[in-house]
Image (tube, grey):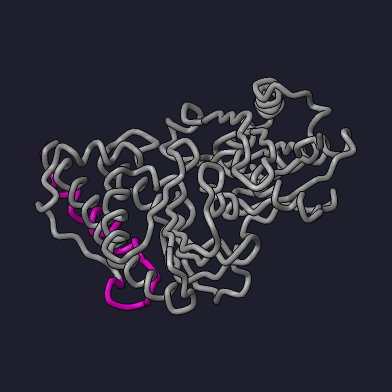
Amino acid sequence: MKKKTLILGIETSCDETAAAVIEENIGTIPNILSNVVSSQIDVHKEFGGVVPELAARSHIEKIDLIVSKAIKESGKDLSDIDGVAVTAGPGLIVCLSVGLNFAKSLAFSLNKPFIAVNHLEGHALSPKLVTDLNFPYLLLLISGGHTQFLSVKKYGKYKRLGTTIDDALGEAFDKTAKLLGIEFPGGPKLEKFAEKGDSNKFNLPKPIINKGGCNLSFAGLKTAILRIIKNIKSDQEKYDLAASFQKTIEEILYIKSKIAFKEFSKNNSIKEKAFVVAGGVAANKGIRKKLIQVSDENDFISIFPDIKLCGDNAAMIALVGLEKYKIKKFDNLDLSASPRLALDKNAKFLKGSGLIY
């Protein structure tokens, strides 16, 4: 019987040190044999955000242990691995370099193919780790560093339909949480805060909601929060502001998703249209509920990766590595980290901190 391809994935683009081993299943969903993620929350908590130099140092300290643990949990030997895949960008260059250098050394020592992976492509294909999803599909990628609508035509072919022109959505959540006094990482905790509040208490702006097509903007919303927070005197008012923020984000994504559905449908005349929502912010329950609603109303099938696959992880990197391995698309060991790596290389440049180009 033919040996099933085994790919080791490594991810160090920001503040998670991750490694995973996946096994090819011909014609169906790959097996995730291990998926180890080590968070750095305690390292960055006192600073209220990720400090790149500290993140890189933590990666250096942990990466050997995390990779060894992933190999052990997979039940395989290191010599069984057929290829080593690693995130090459986008991300923090000092962090990317740790994973890249480790993966290069490992691939060289094992005499196995070295495969560089676009982090965004990992998120884009992550649902294929749990469901037999057909191309093409519409993707909304929402994370700490990225907010984009993309048409995923096939492996390696992506068309950007819209993007943030300033802050990424996850960044807006984190900054709002910090203003509300929520401990880092505040973004995921803000939704819990919001459950105690009145979502109709504050009327917050929805920047470029009626213009810009599928493009989004969150900087003005963050500025409004900053202005309001100066006059807040009670915890209940903080809960109300958090709830109003959560509701506003849900409404923005609802409206912009409807526009994206129309754009996607113009160029894709298929019966079953899928709407995939991926990235760390896709774990937000309120956002999930709202996007399921808008999908149902517009005859799209909504698909979300498992919660454990929404945030940064190495299983999604290994998956892209597996796809590249199948077509023998390997990389040279002199490849450098690319902190502004894009998925749609033909997309027009738009100035803004939420754009990773």
Which one is in front, 278 or 348? 278
- Residue 92 in picture, x, y percent from top left: 60, 48
* Quarter of the image with the C terminus in it: bottom right
Q: Residue at x 14, y 49 (%)?
A: 199
User: Is 317 included in the stretch rendered in magenta?
Assistant: no
* Quarter of the image with the N terminus in it: top right
- Residue 151 in picture, x, y percent from top left: 51, 67
Write down the quadrant of residue 78 in the picture. top right
The magenta span reads 208-234
Q: Residue at x 42, y 74 (%)?
A: 265
Q: Residue at x 50, y 73 (%)?
A: 350
User: Is 221 included in the stretch rendered in magenta?
Assistant: yes
Q: Residue at x 62, y 66 (%)?
A: 157
**In this picture, is 288 found above or below 183?**
below
- Residue 262 in picture, x, y percent from top left: 37, 75
Q: Is residue 61 visible?
A: no
